[in-house]
Image (cartoon, helix red, strand yellow):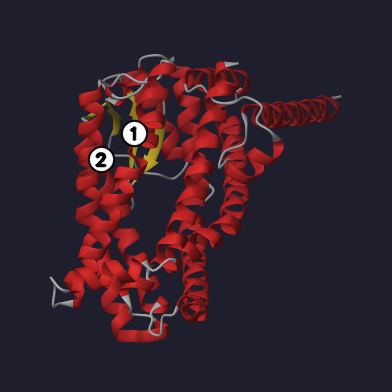
Amino acid sequence: MDAKKYNNIKLAVGIGKAVFSFVLILLFVWLGYSLRLENYLSSYFDSKYLLFLAFILVTGVVASILFAPVNYYTGFYLEHKYNLSNQTFGKWVWENFKGMLVSLVIGVPIMLIFYFILDRFGEMWWLPFAIVMFLISVILSQIFPILIMPIFYKITPIDNSELKEKIESLAKKAGLKVENVYKFNMSKNTKKANAAFTGLGKTKRIILGDTLTENFSVEEIVTVIAHELGHYKKKHIVKNILIGTITSFLTLYLIALLYNISLGWFGFTSITEIAALPLLALWSMLIGVITTPLGNILSRKFEYEADEYAIKETGIPEVFISTLKKLTDQNLGDKEPHPFVEWFFYSHPSIKNRVAAIKKLAENLNNRTSQSSDEIEFGKV
């Protein structure tokens, strides 16, 4: 009951926040406040790039203040109410502050590159910007486990030799060379448990939350890692990069097209007018309503495929099922969300559907094994 209520509250708040954001941005442009802000700031900045950054900074600060109560409610109050957080208020503020700094370090150069491309390439801005964003995403994927994640967590090699050997054996079967298996102090923030496969190229790493290593058996953790390795073996990472790149190019093209069309609706004449730029966010949000469920459909398909790989490699479906149920309980996941909610919002299948799929797969594998044994026996006779 708590899990259902917790997830419904987060969903309702998330939808409300998105709708409110859209309406707020629309009114900001439609009522002329965007143009007024640009005119006001232009008296302080001669450089259009500094003016652009100042515009982004002011709107960002105002948005942060407006949404601060909602972020506190979902990020701190709700997590403590349902006994999921280990953070004090001070630590919660500090973690969010670090996140903001990292976002600025990464985001400011991207924003400047965007405006330069917009100014330089005109209506074709979407193409070079899509290329740049692809290159940036590859770089970020490579540096994330070695430069970004350590800012938030202490990462150390796991000290369980049995677990390490089993994971390395699984990785070898999947064709992945693993230099080491790591854990991070996830418990400093939350009671939730998780594991992930991060990085690209030489920075590929398997990382486990200490909430996983301390509360789950070696056999249980092995099934989780087998699932993550399934994503690698099934080339989901490469497929996601390829599909994400195509989607990114197409999305940016549509945003650029719709942005050009809508400029006149609000009295703008140039795509480089800073006051008009919030329209990009509006079109991005509207397109996201279509791309989000489509992306989640593909993501759930990949999750089922990774589950299948885990079952075939470990041969212990009952352990995998119990582990998934245990993780769902620990993370307070909704075991049976409304079908539409799962279809639209869930990147992973619900535990109910995952368990049903695993049981069906295990049954099919057992039937095939039995048939093979019968054929062998018949051959001997």
Mark 2 burial class by Cα count in 10 Å: few <14, some 14-19, many 20+: few
Q: Residue type at mark 1?
A: Ile
Horizontal arrangement in the rendering, residue 372 relative to residue 184 (left or right):
right
Q: Quadrant of the C terminus?
A: top right
Residue 345 is situated, as x and y percent measured from the top left of the image, at 58, 43
Residue lying at 78% horizontally and 28% vertically, measured from the top left: 367
Q: In which quarter of the image is residue 49?
A: bottom left
Tell me the element at label 1: strand
Residue lying at 63% horizontally and 49% vertically, measured from the top left: 297
Q: Name the residue under label 2.
A: 149
Q: Nearer the viewer, mark 2 or mark 1?
A: 2
> On residue 128, which mark appears?
none
Residue 23 is situated, as x and y percent measured from the top left of the image, at 49, 55
Q: Name the residue under label 1.
A: 207
The answer to whether marks 2 and 1 mark residues whose Cβ atoms lie closer than 8 Å is yes
Residue lying at 20% horizontally and 64% vertically, measured from the top left: 54
Q: In which quarter of the image is residue 117?
A: bottom left
Front-lying residue, 163 or 124? 124
Does residue 202 appear anywhere in the picture?
no
Tell me the element at label 2: helix
> Marks 2 and 1, Cα distance to the nearest angstrom?
11 Å
Residue 166 is situated, as x and y percent measured from the top left of the image, at 41, 26
Indicate whether 32 appears above or below 199: below
Q: Residue type at mark 2?
A: Met
Front-lying residue, 81 or 274? 274
Residue 203 is situated, as x and y percent measured from the top left of the image, at 28, 48
- The count of marks equals 2
Dot placed on the residue nearer the N-terminal end, 2 or 1: 2
Q: Quadrant of the N terminus?
A: top right
